[in-house]
């Protein structure tokens, strides 16, 4: 058990809003019963006597939140990137995901994924598994042991995928039900089920209806893909001529945030109607800039989402993205937004370091509740960054040191990590 009250000392940085950082240099971050009690420049007298972990000149930030990552794709990250989405799925993704029918393969592959997630600056994640119930349970057992807080989904696919991976509709729904029961039986503390219809092209109307029943019975959140690529969007129009727009093809089944928290990855081509519906239904957007570049999808209009008050977080989308390192994802978000502004649409200004940091912490964190900030009452997820490996000759203020971390940090900078007030083993 962690102590009911303990204190971290260091250079504390967090967001209350997308516009600015909150900075407390050489300050105190107090954890009480797994939640943030407060940030103080001088430790209040009444706090004296509680343990203080002094991290010296290190930076202390909220844990990073990955709203979209595929665990089984970790094995082929950085490979086969010269294709667009649909060809990439057929050529790389489906053959690899089929291997997880073997628990032996899943054990070997997920070990690597889970260890690297544990050592990263990520404290929370929404994770896709494969269609396989047993391998997904194995992944959940392994994630639980890390102490990270995750939502993990058994994928559903009953159309438009190879014979070696496709499920019958009833089988897909039945296996999902058995998987949910197994998960509840295991009584995980930090690992939770999330419904995961892969995307509209992979799921029949009947399957969507079955998943809605399961959602209402067990009150489950949902993750999927939305408006990622033009070929995919044209395909959804053919498959669902009755839908007003792509998101409507989920909403017709009640699977677009109306009843339960929902996160949709990409939204590169979401138009006004889709944006309005996401806002109305409280849908979260997982912005995955590196993936959008790698599989030539495009660049999402993130500033428009922020201006319209939508929930936006960051996703690594491995293996569309090549790394689980969310610092890279933040830098990619800034860089992609600059190219979008320069090349195609100067009405949306580029994103700032403040905005992408907000998205990777408090923005995505809101999917998990009061998560991603150091405001009082937030769950105590914190990452301590030792930036001394990256030498510099000039003095740098705290904001500049964080900005540099966004561009340069990886797991080597992660000195300590806490989830809900418990320290995570990094060794
Ligand atoms: N759309 C459907 N499946 C996938 C996937 O695995 N990755 C990405 N990026 N998009 C998808
Ligand atoms: Fe994805």
Image: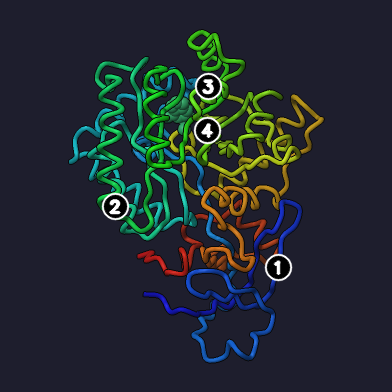
**Quadrant containing the N terminus in the rendered view:** bottom left
Pointer 1 local density, CA inside 10 Å: few below 14, some 14–19, many at least 20: some
User: Looking at the image, in which quadrant does ligand 1 appear?
Assistant: top left
Going from N to C along the chain, the mark reached first, 1 or 3, is 1
Q: Earlier in the sequence, mark 4 or mark 2?
A: 2
Q: Distance from label 2 to label 1 (Cα)?
A: 35 Å
What number is the disc on residue 23? 1
Real-space Cα separation, disc 1 to disc 4, in angstroms: 31 Å
Question: Mark 3, residues whose alpha carbon is within 10 Å: few (<14), some, or many (≥20)?
Answer: some
Residue assigned mark 3: 252
Say which element carries label 4. helix
Marks 1 and 4 close (CB-CB < 8 Å): no
Q: Quadrant of residue 23?
A: bottom right
Q: Which mark is residue 142?
A: 2
Secondary structure of the residue carrying tag 2 is helix
The earlier-in-sequence mark between 1 and 4 is: 1
| Residue receiving disc 4 | 291
Q: In which quarter of the view is residue 155 placed?
A: top left
* Comparing labels 4 and 3, the label whose residue is closer to the camera: 3
Q: Ligand 2 near label 2 (Cβ, under 8 Å)?
A: no
N-terminal-most mark, 4 or 3:
3
């Amino acid at each position: 058990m962690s102590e009911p009250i303990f204190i971290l000392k260091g250079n504390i940085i967090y967001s209350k809003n997308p516009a600015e950082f909150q900075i407390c240099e050489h300050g105190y971050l107090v954890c009480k019963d797994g939640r943030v009690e407060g940030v103080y420049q001088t430790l209040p007298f009444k706090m004296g006597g509680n343990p203080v972990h002094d991290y010296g000149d290190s930076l202390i930030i909220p844990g990073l939140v990955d709203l979209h990552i595929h665990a089984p794709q970790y094995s082929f990250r950085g490979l086969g990137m010269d294709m667009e989405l649909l060809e990439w799925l057929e050529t790389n993704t489906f053959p690899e995901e089929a291997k997880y029918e073997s628990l032996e393969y899943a054990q070997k592959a997920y070990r690597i994924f889970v260890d690297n997630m544990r050592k990263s600056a990520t404290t929370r994640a929404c994770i896709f598994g494969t269609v396989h119930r047993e391998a997904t349970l194995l992944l959940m057992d392994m994630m639980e042991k890390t102490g990270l807080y995750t939502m993990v989904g058994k994928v559903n696919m009953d159309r438009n995928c190879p014979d070696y991976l496709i499920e019958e509709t009833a089988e897909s729904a039945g296996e999902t039900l058995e998987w949910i029961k197994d998960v509840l039986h295991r009584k995980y503390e930090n690992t939770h089920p999330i419904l995961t219809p892969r995307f509209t092209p992979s799921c029949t109307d009947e399957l969507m209806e079955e998943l809605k029943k399961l959602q209402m019975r067990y009150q489950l959140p949902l993750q999927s893909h939305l408006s990622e690529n033009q070929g995919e969007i044209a395909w959804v129009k053919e498959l669902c001529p009755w839908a007003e727009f792509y998101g409507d093809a989920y909403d017709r089944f009640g699977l677009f945030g109306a009843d339960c928290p929902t996160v949709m990855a990409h939204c590169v081509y979401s138009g006004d109607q889709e944006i309005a519906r996401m806002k109305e239904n409280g849908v979260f957007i997982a912005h995955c800039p590196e993936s959008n570049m790698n599989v030539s999808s495009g660049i999402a209009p993130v500033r428009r989402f922020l201006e319209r008050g939508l929930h936006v977080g960051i996703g690594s989308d491995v293996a569309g993205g090549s790394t689980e390192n969310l610092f890279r994802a933040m830098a990619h978000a800034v860089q992609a937004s600059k190219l979008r502004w320069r090349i195609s649409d100067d009405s949306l200004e580029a994103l700032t370091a403040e905005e992408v940091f907000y998205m990777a912490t408090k923005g995505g964190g809101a999917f998990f509740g009061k998560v991603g900030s150091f405001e009082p009452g937030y769950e105590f997820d914190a990452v301590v960054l030792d930036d001394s490996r990256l030498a510099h000759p000039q003095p740098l203020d705290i904001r500049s040191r964080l900005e540099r971390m966004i561009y340069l940090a990886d797991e080597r900078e992660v000195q300590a990590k806490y989830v809900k007030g418990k320290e995570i083993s990094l060794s």
